Image (cartoon, rainbow, N blue to C red):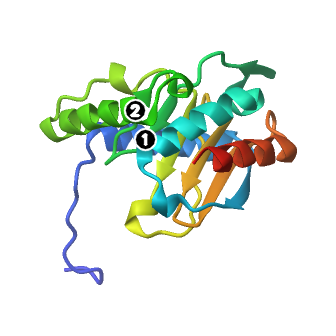
């Protein structure tokens, strides 16, 4: 018996291994900064937050892009990856959908997650990532940028924090994104 006591070794799931790889890659390769703004997200449902993020992405193109091969890429479509229970399904064209349509889409995704049938295709093609802990009562947190994205949004009950790639997004861009997002929720 070691000084640590009994050790249980747990094999991570495929999704956990993918998340671990992406987090390590992001922290090693993306020079990021964070900008926060007070919001009242406690009164907004997740679908409304996703819709507001989609509109903000269209309004501030540098946030809806990536830094690739020393060049800035701006994406035409606002596809929001939503962190849910260890998976990140994508709401394609979040800016063009109503919160009601997004809510229906997220309900289908949750059903697929519970059934273990969520496909890799359902988690592909995001241009941005949104994580919300508002319903868990967390006031503020930060999230890590997914490689291939310029930014990621963490939403608490009282604060929205944008983590942004400093090679592509300026602090003024981050502020403009958060202002547009906050106005939309």
Quick check: can you spot residue 33? yes
Task: Give the residue at mark 2.
Answer: 102
Q: Position of residue 94 (x, y in %)?
A: 51, 28
* Viewer-side residue, 30 vs 44: 44
Disc on the earlier residue, 1 or 2 = 1
Q: Are there few (<14), some (14-19), or many (20+) residues within 10 Å of tag 2?
A: many
Kindly state the secondary structure of the residue where label 2 is placed: helix
Give residue 29's quadrant in the image. top right
Q: Are there few (<14), some (14-19), or many (20+) residues within 10 Å of tag 1?
A: many
Q: Is residue 110 left or right of residue 173?
A: left
Q: Position of residue 27 (x, y in %)?
A: 62, 47
Q: Is residue 176 left or right of residue 110?
A: right
Task: Give the residue at mark 1.
Answer: 47
Q: Position of residue 148 (x, y in %)?
A: 61, 28
Q: Is residue 52 left or right of residue 73?
A: left
Question: Which quadrant would the N terminus be assigned to in this image?
Answer: bottom left
Q: Are marks 1 and 2 in contact (CB under 8 Å)?
A: yes
Residue extending farthest top: 76
- For the residues labelled 1 and 2, the Cα–Cα distance comes to 5 Å
* Viewer-side residue, 120 vs 59: 59
Tell me which residue sits at (84%, 47%) in the image.
171
Give residue 69's quadrant in the image. top right
């Amino acid at each position: 018996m070691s000084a640590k006591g009994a050790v249980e070794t747990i094999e991570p799931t495929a999704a956990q291994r993918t998340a671990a790889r992406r987090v390590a890659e992001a922290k090693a390769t993306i020079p990021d900064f964070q900008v926060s703004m007070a919001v009242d997200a406690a009164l907004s449902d997740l679908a409304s937050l996703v819709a507001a993020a989609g509109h903000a992405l269209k309004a501030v193109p540098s946030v809806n892009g990536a830094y690739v091969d020393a060049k800035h890429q701006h994406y035409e479509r606002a596809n929001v990856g939503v962190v849910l229970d260890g998976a990140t399904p994508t709401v394609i064209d979040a800016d063009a959908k109503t919160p009601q349509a997004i809510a229906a889409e997220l309900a289908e995704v949750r059903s697929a997650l519970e059934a273990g049938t969520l496909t890799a295709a359902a988690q592909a093609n995001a241009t941005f990532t949104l994580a919300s802990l508002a319903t868990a009562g967390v006031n503020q947190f930060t999230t890590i940028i997914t490689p291939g994205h310029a930014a990621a949004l963490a939403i608490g009950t009282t604060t929205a924090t944008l983590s942004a790639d400093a090679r592509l997004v300026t602090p003024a861009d981050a502020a403009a994104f958060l202002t547009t997002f906050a106005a939309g929720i």
